[in-house]
Amino acid sequence: MTNLDLYAKAEHLLGIEEATEALYDLYRSELDEYNVKTLLDVGCGRGGFMRRMISDGVKCKGVDLSSVMVEECKAQGLDAECIEAKDVDGKYDAIVSIFDVLNFMDKEELFEFLEAMAEKLNDDGIFIADINTLYGFKDVAEGTMSNESGDEFLNVDAVFKENELHTTFTLFEKEADGRYVKYQDTIVQYFHKIELFKKLKGLELIDKQNFSLYDTEDKTLFIFKKRK
Ligand SMILES: C[S@@+](CC[C@H](N)C(=O)[O-])C[C@H]1O[C@@H](n2cnc3c(N)ncnc32)[C@H](O)[C@@H]1O
């Protein structure tokens, strides 16, 4: 199991449903300002945002590097693939990366990703994404939490150092024979300075808003348009 698959197995114990819904509302209202008929959701997770946009009449495609997430999308009849976003066919009116997806990439991967996304946009296409602010990493994400439900127990331990958040997930799952299986892995998230987003060849930053998801201004939302 990869670290992203472990995240997928543990996500329902993190208590982030409300925050996720609030993010979807924000993205949907931003997308409303544009004429979006086709959408690519990169890091689509379980496909919650795609389901919303499909109900608004938008044709959606999702990619995620966790096969657990992608299988759940497919089980709901969504068009999802477990491939890198740069390998997706076709062009889209809008691309989104919702809930810290860009923080999963280091600086080099992020640059390459953003330039590749410019190539996947139709003329006048937009790309919307959010990232954690430094405050969001240091004062909100860092720390320890645990939760349990039924036959599962999760511990999450996050440490922020040198602009990286190292989050160790430890999940215990009870088997049919009563014994517990332990899964443990670490996900690294990278803090990115806003300057990085202003220097892109393919995308022009047209709007930037700090907003509060869990706490004061813990996130930044970026809206880019494809450069002509
Ligand atoms: C915090 S979850 C958010 C999921 C979804 N966007 C949502 O709002 O529910 C981050 C997701 O990004 C995926 N991910 C991380 N790095 C990725 C990458 N380079 N390309 C595609 N997906 C990625 C993870 O597997 C995970 O499903």
Image (cartoon, grey):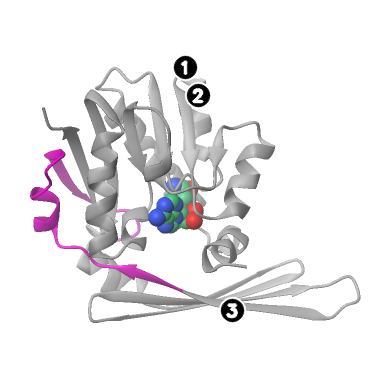
Pick the quarter of the image with the N terminus: bottom right
Pick the quarter of the image with the C terminus: top left
Determine the CA span between mark 3 and mark 1: 40 Å
Image mark for residue 184: 3
Image mark for residue 113: none
Magenta region includes residue 189: yes
Position of 59 relative to 8 (above/below):
above
Magenta region includes residue 10: no
Residue at horizontal 57%, vertical 59%? Answer: 8
In this rendering, would 96 be left or right of 198? right
Q: Nearer the viewer, residue 156 or 195?
A: 195
Q: Are marks 3 and 1 in contact (CB under 8 Å)?
A: no
Q: Which three-letter amino acid code belongs to the residue tagged 1?
A: Gly
Report crowding for label 2: few under 14, some 14 to 19, many 20 or more residues within 10 A (C-alpha).
some
Q: Nearer the viewer, residue 186 or 63?
A: 63
Determine the CA span between mark 3 and mark 2: 35 Å
Position of 117 relative to 84 (above/below):
above
Determine the CA span between mark 1 and mark 2: 5 Å
Residue at horizontal 59%, vertical 53%? Answer: 67
Dot 1 beta carbon under 8 Å from ligand 1: no
Of mark 3 and mark 1, the one earlier in the sequence is: 1
Q: Are marks 1 and 2 in contact (CB under 8 Å)?
A: yes
Q: What is the magenta range? A: 187-215
Q: Nearer the viewer, residue 161 or 42?
A: 42
